[in-house]
Image (cartoon, rainbow, N blue to C red):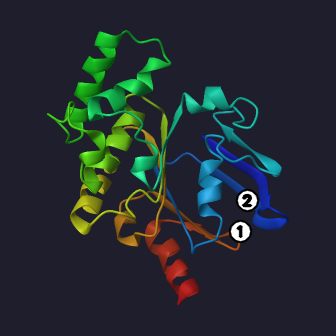
Amino acid sequence: MIEFEDVGHSYDGRAVLDGVDLRLDERRVAFVGANGSGKSTLARMINGLVHPTRGRVLVDGVDPARDGRAVRRRVGFVFTHPDSQIVMPTAGEDVAFSLRRQGVPKAERQRRAAEVLAEHGLAGYAEHPAHQLSGGQKQLLALCSMLVLEPDVLVCDEPTTLLDLRNKRHFAEVLSGLPQQVVMVTHDLELLADFDRVVVLDGGRVVADDAPSAALAHYRALVG
């Protein structure tokens, strides 16, 4: 359960979010809205990357602003630009690096890294230079680096923006098969047909919250 209670946030005195109240317990939830609507700021609050200036966020009762470490053990985050998450020379090392802070022995880290890479379409790439992967492969690598930690929730902030159509569809298929709760910020509305819920933001407020067809119809009328 992810809860936003009267959440507001301001940057340099400018309100980005105002009075957001949401309870998210569905398996697949999307935030959509125009640039500057506040959707990415809202998503980043789930694991404490951004703190509310008013109200609070709870992840299964834990406030990320108060105990970010505990929340981040349960919430993985995938950014728009995978290069910002890739920190090690090879794909296998990058995934294994995520486990280092947990004190997992090296051999076990390598085994689990190879396993999650293979599970998500990167079998045989453990020794491949991470920054020489294609755009789609890099985004899958960023995803694997989160999934190896076995989070309960996965937040994806516009993860398909830099991908071509084939890789967008592949990435969406991978997400649809995950057991985790997924919260995705996106402009790719065609990827949301099988989501459980779509939340539309405009000017920092929730203006629609419904099943995909109804919520997206509202959004399309809004941006008309």
Q: Which residue is situated farthest in the bottom direction here?
A: 224
Q: Nearer the viewer, residue 209 or 135?
A: 135
Residue corresponding to mark 2 = 20
Type of the residue with mark 1: Arg
Q: Which residue is situated farthest in the left direction here?
A: 124
- Image coords of residue 210 (percent x, y): 54, 66
Q: Quadrant of residue 37?
A: bottom right
Secondary structure found at label 1: strand
- Above or below, comparing residue 109 to residue 187 in the picture: above
The numbered dot on residue 205 is 1
Q: Is residue 211 left or right of residue 52?
A: left
Q: Earlier in the sequence, mark 1 or mark 2?
A: 2
The N terminus appears in which quarter of the rendering?
Answer: top right
Total marks in image: 2
Q: Determine if residue 61 is in view.
A: yes
- Above or below, comparing residue 131 to residue 211 in the picture: above
Q: Residues within 10 Å of mark 2 (few under 14, many from 20)?
A: many
* C-alpha separation, residue under disc 1 versus residue under disc 2: 6 Å
Q: Nearer the viewer, residue 21 or 63?
A: 63
Q: Is residue 217 left or right of residue 4?
A: left
Tags 1 and 2 touching, CB below 8 Å: yes
- Above or below, comparing residue 127 to residue 193 in the picture: above
Type of the residue with mark 2: Val
- Image coords of residue 177 (percent x, y): 30, 44
Q: Quadrant of residue 72?
A: top right
- The residue positioned 32% from the left and 27% from the top of the image is 93
Q: Is residue 200 left or right of residue 68?
A: left
